[in-house]
Structure formats: structure tokens, C-alpha cells
Image (cartoon, grey):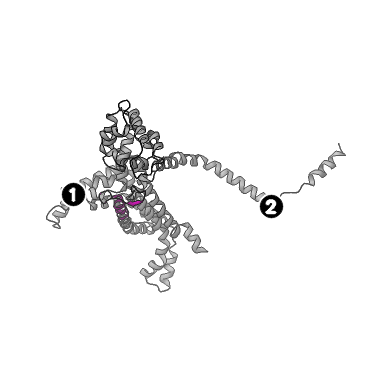
Amino acid sequence: MTAASPTAAGIVSTRPEPSLKKRLRRAELRKKLLYGTLILPLALFVLLVFVWPIASLMTKSVENPEVHDNLPQTLRALKAWDGREVPPEAAFKALAGELEAARGSPAIAAVAKRLNREETGYRSLIMKTARKLPLAEGEPARSALIEIDERWGTVEPWQAIKRSGSATTAFYLLAAIDRSVDAKGDIVTAPPEEAVYVDVLARTFWMSLIVTGLCMALGFPVAYLMANLPVKHGNTLMIFVLLPFWTSVLVRVAAWIVLLQNEGLINKLLMWLGLTNSPVPLLFNRTGVYIAMVHILLPFMVLPLYSVMKGISPVYMRAAVSLGCPPFKSFWKVYFPQTLPGIGAGGLLVFIMCMGYYITPALLGGPQEQMLSYFIAFYTNQTINWGMAAALSAVLLAATLVLYMIYSRYLGPSAKAVKAR
């Protein structure tokens, strides 16, 4: 044993030690794995309750199963059809057989509803045809369907069936931006009576911009005062800023309805002061919507501004003033640029939340104050048109992502890194 020990020791000692670089890399990898293990439950939670539902909803904007799943033989018969003349007898026969098989089931209603989005009136065409089936034995399907409704003798219904027969479609996404596909397959502008969503999106942007500007104008001095007051008074003011969070949004909107109505406290006060002779219309218009939304969203502007202002040392302002710079110019040139991250974060937060608002415009506004979220709720709850609701949601999500990229590029951490270079 005494002879083997030196040999064993010699073998061990001849192994090369890992370099410092490799040991540091392994330590860093272990640290990353530890951090990853710690955040794994949160990541799974976000994936299951946030990412997956949104992704599932977004897929509804391109799904097109109604005609594809319920009229497969008809679509197969129309595959080689050029769309210029009435399709052959095989297409009529396949359509008659499939409509007869689907009669009385949810499938026929789904097909009729989907084709009616291509052209108004096709729902009644499908349901009428299905009711008058089956065909007599040996009767030609073409003449029988044309006898049921003359529209089967034209190419338009067949073109609509072929257009809507794909498993996926851009129909809803195009409709969400007031576009459609004509009989030739070209993307065209929707008719004026149907082109509403671009105007609604522009209205949503404009109202969100106004509310964000008002919140910024009101929130900046409040945050500045909170950051520069003594701690005791600043904390007291913070309680008043956070107080609205203790009350439901619905309750606050109901309170504004009481205050803004013609017989409400605000109109009574204005008339008592002699400022007006009659009640000022403040409810069910844009004025009421702006007032309530600014009240609800103001804390979301104040808090980011306060967090940034609290970290700005007063030494900079005192140094600028001591060097002869006027107070206002010192504020504008020295203090204000340092608050831009807070302005950007608060403005982005308020703008994005405002774009998705539904309750406040619905209760305090009129038809001309409804934002894009109102139509998403309409298609989700009333018409059960998931495709259109998902398409409008996709437009809203895309606008939100564009805003975030603009903020990240010009006001976020990445902008600071670019400037530092």
C-alpha cells in the first residue's frame, strides 16, 4: 500500500486544473440555472394565464373552419373551376347533398353565417335551399337548385363559397382595417357604409392622446410637489394619490354620472355661481369621458413620475442657479430632461390603458365616443363573431407593440445605452 500511494498521488497530480476562465463560466452557468429555477413557476404562470390565452384568441382572427369543414365535397368540385361561368353539375350535386346532410344542425347555420359575411343575403339563400331539399330521385341538381333560387344560376354565390373555403383567411384582419377581397381576389377598400373601423381606431388613438396629455399636465406638478416636500407631507399627499385605487372603477364612473348630469352637483354649482344660465351638457359626450378617464388614470402618471423625480438630486438645480442660470431655465435645461424616462413610462402606461378602456366610454359617452374595445366586446358578447373580435384585438395589440417599441427606442433603457455609446 505504501508503494501504491505515491503512484496514485502522482496520477491525480498530473491531471490539468481547469482554467480560471472555465471555472468562471461554470459558476456563471450555475447561477443562471439557479435563477431560472426560481423564476420557472412565474414563467409558467404567465405562459398559462397570459400568453396562451392571447395567442389562442389571435388564432381566431385567421381561422376559417365553417365552409372548409362542412362543405368539403363542394370545395373539391370547385377546385378546378375558373369562376367565369356557372360551375359544372358535380358542384351542384355535391352542394345539394351536403346541405341536405347538414340541415337542422349547427353546421348549416355556421355555413350560412360565414357566407353572409361575404355578401349580405347569402344566409337566407343557404337556409332556404336547405329547407327545400332533398331533390327528387334522378332530378338534375343544377336545375333543381336554380328553381329553388335563381341566384344559384349566377357565379357570385359559388365564388363566395370558393373564397371562404380555405382553412385560414385574411377576411377578418382585412375587415378590421376596412379592406375586403373582391371577386377577382384583389384587396379593395370596403364600401363607405361598412368602413368604420379605421375611424374608430383613429378616434381611439386621439382620445387616448388627449387623456394622456391631460394626465401629464396634471400629474407632473403633483409628482414634483410630492418629490420635493418634506417626507411627512409627501407621504400624506401619496395617500391621496393612491386613494382612488381603494374604490372600484365602476363605482367611480357611477359617481361621475351623479356629478355630471344636468341636475348634478357640478351644474348646480355653475348656475349658483352665475357662470351659466342652464345646465351644461357634461354627460353622454366626450367631455364626460375625458373627465372620468383622467380621474381614473391620473395615478398611473403620477407614480412613474414620482419614482424618477425622487431619484434626482437637488444639487443639480442648486449648482445651475449658483452659476447664474435663472430658476426657470435651470428647471427646463437641467431638471426636466432627467424626468423624461418618467414621462415616457407614465405616458406609455396611461396611453396603453386608455386604448383598451371599455366601461367608462360605454357608460359616460355617446355613440361617437365608443372606442375599439367597445366593438371587441360587441362581437364577443352579442354577435358571437370570434373572428372579428380577434382581428380587432390583433389591431389593438399591434398598435400597443408599436408604441412600446417607440418608447423603448427613444425613452427606454435601450435609448440610454445608445446615447452612452
Residue 143 place in picture, x, y as percent: 29, 34
Magenta range: 184-208
Residue 34 place in picture, x, y as percent: 58, 43
User: Is 405 or 295 nearer to us in this picture?
Assistant: 405
User: Is 386 or 230 nearer to us in this picture?
Assistant: 386
Q: Which residue is situated farthest in the left direction here?
A: 277
Distance between the alpha carbons at the discs numbered 2 and 1: 75 Å
Q: How crowded is the residue under tag 1: few (<14 C-alpha within 10 Å), some, or many (20+)?
A: few
Residue 187 covered by magenta stretch: yes
CB atoms at circles 2 and 1 under 8 Å apart? no
- Residue ID at (58%, 44%): 33
- Residue ID at (80%, 47%): 14
| Residue on which the image places disc 1 | 265
**Can residue 97 be seen by looking at this rendering?**
yes
Viewed as shown, does residue 414 lie left or right of 245?
Answer: right
Looking at the rendered structure, which numbered label has been put on residue 20? 2
